[in-house]
Image (spheres, rainbow, N blue to C red):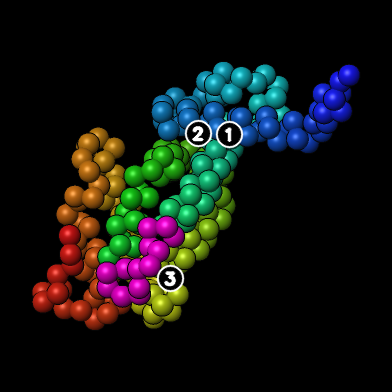
Amino acid sequence: MAQPAQRARATPRSREERSADSRALILDAAVECLVEHGYSGASTLAIQAKAGVSRGRLLHHFPSRDGLLVAAAQHLATERLTRTQERVAEALTGEPAGPRRVDRCVELLWLTFHEPHFWAAMELWTAARTNPALAAALRPAERSLRKAIHEVADRIWGPAVVAHPRYDELRELLFTSMRGAALPYAFEQRPPGSDRHVRLWKSIARTLLFGEDPARHPAEE
């Protein structure tokens, strides 16, 4: 006699669930194409083939290529932000507030500029310079993402540092500087941890937050 579990049939998935699955497949495929082949190589045909969906299904979710690529970059960044927050929380467990924790935060923040979501964003930013439609699609999405990135950064640094009157200056300086310093890694293969800027960023952070004299208290490697 068949057991109840064997007789039971799987609950049919709703239209909304199937639609969400298709959208996720398309976004994941778009992310892979964007990171592997760049903006110019991330065509809707390539994304459709990688996702294994029909043309109609892709266009139903994303009528425009630029809208799809912007959504894909945001999808990847949001996912990575969650993972980064979890990884950093584990890395900083037991590390008390102070200069050594700040040094560690600088190191961990710098590593985020070498992950796929950073390069996906750079592909779109570069293309947007000469593509007004892409720029228009990118602006509101980037504003929303910037807010989320700031919130994660604040949790990484911790309340003691965030409360410092010069924290906002430091955060923006590091973001801008690290973004620029990361770009040569597009064609240079070297360990990010050995970058000479890391020592400088630590020294700047210690000076702004703790008033250390960089000449007398150089940041540790």
Q: Earlier in the sequence, mark 3 or mark 2?
A: 2
Observer-nearest of 67 and 57: 57
**In terms of secondary structure, where does tag 3 sit?**
loop
Would residue 64 be found to the left or right of residue 185 on screen? right
The answer to whether the residue labelled 2 contacts the one labelled 1, judged by CB atoms less than 8 Å apart, is yes
Q: Residue at x 57, y 52 (%)?
A: 140
Q: Residue 57 at what x, y percent from top left?
A: 70, 24
Q: Residue at x 34, y 44 (%)?
A: 114
Q: CA distance from mark 3 to mark 2?
A: 31 Å
Q: Few, some or many C-alpha atoms within 10 Å of disc 1 (few <14, some 14-19, many ≥20)?
A: many
Name the residue tied to disc 2: 31
52 versus 188 height, above or below? above
The answer to whether the residue labelled 3 contacts the one labelled 2, judged by CB atoms less than 8 Å apart, is no
Q: Which mark is residue 158?
A: 3
Q: Which mark is residue 27?
A: 1
Q: Residue 45 at what x, y percent from top left?
A: 56, 19
**In terms of secondary structure, where does tag 2 sit?**
helix
Q: Amino acid at mark 3?
A: Gly
Q: Few, some or many C-alpha atoms within 10 Å of disc 2 (few <14, some 14-19, many ≥20)?
A: many
Q: CA distance from mark 2 to mark 1?
A: 6 Å
Could you tell me which quadrant the C terminus lies in? bottom left
- Look at the image and say whether residue 98 sits in the magenta stretch: yes
Q: Few, some or many C-alpha atoms within 10 Å of disc 3 (few <14, some 14-19, many ≥20)?
A: some
> Which residues fall within the magenta stretch?
89-101
Q: Residue at x 21, y 68 (%)?
A: 203
